[in-house]
Amino acid sequence: MKYLKRFWKTFKDYFHRTTELALPKKVDSNEPLSRYIFNERHIDVQHRRIKPGAFIPPANSRLSVFRISGLLEDIIWDIGKKVGNISHRKLCGRADVIAFEFEKRGFQIEANDNPPRHADIIRWPDEKAKRLSIAQELAEIAKLSIYS
Amino acid sequence: MSFACIATNYENLLTIYPSNGYSKEANEMSRIGNEMESVLSKSMTFDIRYDNILISLIHAFSESALDNWDGYGARATTFNSFIDASKFIKMIPPTFPIPEIDTEPNGGILFEWRKGKKRIFSIIIEGDNNITYAGLFGENKTYGTEYFKNEIPKTILENIQRLFS
């Protein structure tokens, strides 16, 4: 048992280091991207779905996501917890969307690695109503994982 | 400083607890508390359907009353949004379904009606006499802005009916 625990720790540490590894600057169309959710109101637990509010960009028109390609589930959640710690928010869940879904709606994905694996979805339309409409679509296709 | 608290015994929906703050913020908080009390006392309908959504609105407002409530730099929900949202709730026809309340990162209140996968209608009220709306009806979608003052715009009502028809 002790041996297994040590093995798991080593294994996890190895994969933790992969979060620091540089990914290609350009986000691949097939890459999964995670939008971490820190507000319970953005999750409909009963129907296991994301609400559009989770995908509406803030005033700076940059929707924050993380590149989770090649990461273990534990590591993906660890990144979310670290992001939450910065703003003292409790992680509630995450919404995973393939990069292509953003690209086909005319967005650009700007990877900046600050913090590691971070990217912004940019080039949102100016019209608020169109943003809401896109947020609805993204909420419908996103895969919800609830943090427990 | 004054604190606005949601009552759990329903005798008073909102209770304002004054304290001895002198700052500009304390005065503002006190003013907002009094206005909320006034709006809500006028809003009390004694219809559990409306009262539940009003309580949900108060919760949403209080949860997003400070900047960065979502951890991504969201603006605090404005008091004008809250006032207009409670006005909107009072105007929902009794035969219409009650929406779910959410908040959005630009200071508005988001109302959402949903009828299964890919059937959703949402509006954002930002306290500027406008309603931003968007609907997803299977493969069809619609979006736009409507003026909102003394009645719910016809387009909004028609879209809610379309969703549930």
Image (cartoon, coloured by chain):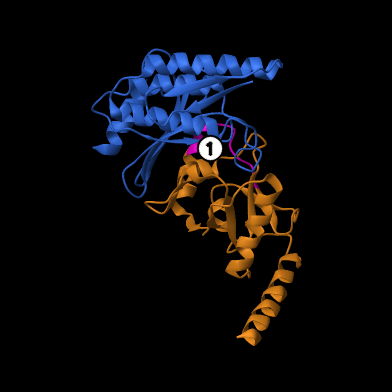
Residue B41 lies in quadrant: top left
**Left or right: where B126 falls relative to B151:** right
Whether residue B112 sits left or right of residue A76 in the image: it is left
Going 70% across and 15% down the picture, which residue do you hit?
Answer: B22
Q: Is residue A127 magenta?
A: yes
Disc 1: CA contacts within 10 A as few (<14), some (14-19) or many (>=20): many
Which chain, by letter, is orange?
A
Name the residue at 71% across, 48% down: A86
Relative to the observer, which residue lies in front, B115 or B65? B65
Q: Is residue B142 above or below residue A64?
A: above
Chain whose colour in the figure is blue = B
Residue behind mark 1: A131
x, y percentage for residue B150? 39, 12
The range drawn in magenta is: A121-132
Quarter in which the C terminus of chain B is drawn: top left
Chain ID at mark 1: A
Say which quadrant the N terminus of chain B sits in.
Answer: top right
Taking the spot 71% from the left edge, 17% from the top edge, the residue there is B23
Vertical side of B54 occupied by A71: above or below: below
